Amino acid sequence: MDYALITGASSGIGRCYAEELAQRGYNIIAVSNQQQPLIDMCGELSSQYGIRTEYIYINLAERNAAQQICDRCNSEGWIVDVLVCNAGMLLFSTLVQTSPDSLATIINLHCTTTTLLCRYFGEQMKQRGSGRILIMSSSTAWLPYPTISHYAATKAYLKSFASSLWYELHRYGVSVTAVFPGAVDTPLYTLSPRLRRLFVTMGIMQRPETIARHAIRAMLRGRRRLVPGLFTKIVVGICAILPARILDIIIRIKPIKKILERV
């Protein structure tokens, strides 16, 4: 039986991806390190949309997580026709203030596990001559970002990886779509509800369900790349041509410098 597998599916954009695909009739394999939310979500989606749902409770930052996931799917006979690599974490801190364990976690989660999942399931899709892969990068992939250097660098890796993977697989009937969202309206940002509503209205932030809807549509159309939202498109466009020297000037501005010194 064919499934869509979504990592980080228990909350945020990942849950919205699961809901969006369930609405379209896909059976779901939800993967996360939050067991009860996974169980609850799978029950809700199965009941509401009449689809089959499975879950894999696992720490995706473990180096062998991708192998365990692939082995489980193979042993259960779950054929992954859609792979959504969404799981991620955001940690605000300069590199020298970030613990080595945290650095290893974010690199394993964003880079190692995503790469290996695409390796294992991409091979199966290539052999079948069909399949779709969606990789969540970020608008931060386009420019150096002090205080999230580790995060932005992993997203830049995913930007390059997804582009190269498209060239390797598209001729075999396998599409690869990279998504580059900006700020997302989630509790991840310590903003008041009023400010979050204002930023959504202004287009500075986007709701997770909006990003998921546009991303799945782009994936199903076989698009290589999606930058959702006009504001994010403008920011990415500017960042793509902005000399790095300009950023060095900006971070010397006294208020910004004080913020950087605190993190």
Image: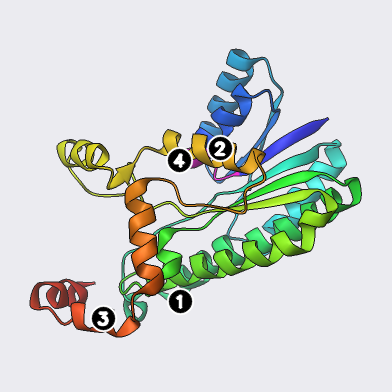
Out of 96 and 120, give the one closest to the viewer.
120
> Which residue type does callout 2 highlight?
Gln
Classify residue 43 by image quadrant: top right
Q: CA distance from mark 2 to mark 1?
A: 26 Å
What's the CA distance linking mark 3 and mark 4?
Answer: 30 Å
* Tag 2 residue: 35
- Mark 4: secondary structure: helix
Residue at x 84% of width, y 56% of height: 123
Which is more N-terminal, label 3 or label 2? Answer: 2
Q: Which residue is mark 4?
A: 211
Task: Compare marks 4 and 2 and give the one earlier in the sequence.
Answer: 2
Residue 224 in the image: above or below residue 76 = below
Q: What's the residue type where badge 4 is placed? A: Ile
Of callouts 3 and 1, which one flags the residue occurring earlier in the amino acid sequence?
Answer: 1
Q: Determine the secondary structure under disc 2.
A: helix
3D distance between C-alphas at marks 2 and 3:
45 Å
List the residue tagged with mark 3. Answer: 246
* Image location (x, y in percent) of residue 56: 67, 41
Instruction: Tell me which segment is drawn in magenta.
Output: 7-14
Element carrying mark 1: helix
